[in-house]
Amino acid sequence: MKFDVSETALGALKLAIQAEKEGLETYLRFAIKTEEKTGKDMFLQLALDEVEHMKLLEEQFEYLSSTGNYRPKELPKTILEKIRPQASKRLLKITGEKGLSALDGLKVALEHETKAVRFYQDFYSNTEDPAARAIFARLIEMEEAHVEIIQAEIDSITGSGYWFGFSEISLEHTESE
């Protein structure tokens, strides 16, 4: 079944807006509870991204409600998307006594972002409107960036040996030896 400019499309946008609000609230709670500065900063950046997603979805909801069409919109890369390929462990590391609660928070965040990716993928697959497809394709990219950042954090905390999907290596000898 394809979505159209109907209560189905508007209902899906309302649901997406609500999911972004819940993500925002969750990340703000995690930021408050996280004592390590870089961890706090990461959760705050995730919260800011959720606000931007929510604004985009609200704008689309209003435009769709009044015109029956989606509004084409160019969405720039977010900070997390920009740092994803170059991020350093030092920048993103969440450690210390709060490591376990940070890990729990990251697992919740990962679940939230994974669900968001699936939701937007379903919506993208079930609409033929080119503007809507472009918007939801971009939201998918943004949420996938969140998934990668969060998974890298989890891998770092748990010492899985992976960082952004790459196996970490250790050198037994240094240059001075």
Image (cartoon, grey):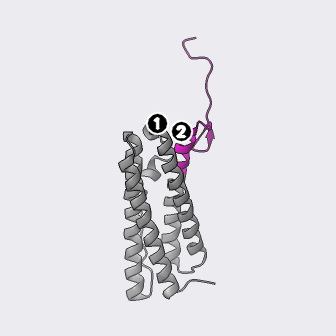
Pointer 2 and pointer 1: residues touching (CB < 8 Å)? Answer: yes
Residue positioned 42% across, 43% down in the render: 39
Q: Amino acid at mark 2?
A: Ile
Q: Position of residue 44 (x, y in %)?
A: 37, 52
What residue sits right under mark 1 in the picture? 95
Element on which disc 2 rests: helix
Q: Is residue 160 above or below residue 119?
A: above
Residue positioned 45% across, 84% down in the render: 69
For the residue carrying disc 2, how many other residues have a C-alpha within 10 Å: few (<14), some (14-19), or many (20+)? some
* Residue 145, label in figure: none
Span colored in magenta: 148-177
Residue 106 seen in this snapshot: yes
What residue sits right under mark 2 in the picture? 157
The tag earlier along the polypeptide, 2 or 1, is 1
Q: Amino acid at mark 1?
A: Thr
Q: Position of residue 12 (x, y in %)?
A: 50, 78
Q: Give the alpha-carbon distance from disc 2 to disc 1, as whole Å.
A: 7 Å
Q: Position of residue 118 (x, y in %)?
A: 58, 66
For the residue carrying disc 1, how many other residues have a C-alpha within 10 Å: few (<14), some (14-19), or many (20+)? many
Q: Count the labels in the image.
A: 2
Residue positioned 44% across, 88% down in the render: 68
Residue 5 seen in this snapshot: no
